[in-house]
Image: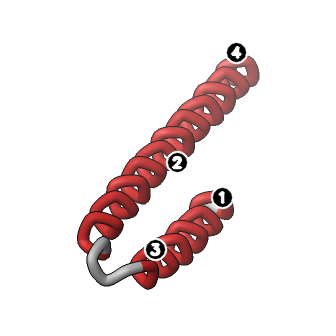
Amino acid sequence: MKIAAETNITITEIKEMILKAGINNRTTNAMNILGISENLWYLIQSNINDRVYQIQRMLADELNVYSG
């Protein structure tokens, strides 16, 4: 979660810098950055979900060992 929060802060800073870069390119830049932001968010979320699943499987295996 800490990585996700840090990534979101960095992305927000990037968005602000690019939006300040030029009036004519604001719309294009904003759309590009928002797309990158969404892609990174989905990547982070999928990685977290994979980790949670792995931990759940490990805990289930441990419980099976002790329940027997």
Q: CA distance from mark 1 to mark 2?
A: 8 Å
The residue tagged 2 is 44
List x then y, in percent, for residue 11: 52, 67
Query: What's the residue at 64%, 67% (across, down)?
Result: 6
Query: What's the residue at 66%, 21% (across, down)?
Result: 61
Query: Which of the image's four quarters has the N terminus?
Result: bottom right
> What amino acid is at disc 1?
Ile
Query: Which secondary structure lies at badge 4?
Result: loop
List x then y, in percent, for residue 42: 41, 47
Task: Give the mark, 4 or 1, whose residue is nearer the N terminus.
Answer: 1
Task: Give the mark, 4 or 2, whose residue is nearer the N terminus.
Answer: 2
> What amino acid is at disc 4?
Gly
The residue tagged 1 is 3
The residue tagged 3 is 18
* Tag in front: 1 or 3: 3
List x then y, in percent, for residue 5: 59, 68
The residue tagged 4 is 68
Instruction: Say whether residue 51 is left or right of residue 45.
Output: right
Q: CA distance from mark 1 to mark 3?
A: 22 Å
Q: CA distance from mark 3 to mark 2?
A: 23 Å
Task: Give the mark, 1 or 3, whose residue is nearer the N terminus.
Answer: 1
Colour mode?
secondary structure
- How packed mark 3 is, by other alpha carbons closer than 10 Å (few <14, some 14-19, many 20 or more), is some
Query: Which secondary structure lies at badge 3?
Result: helix
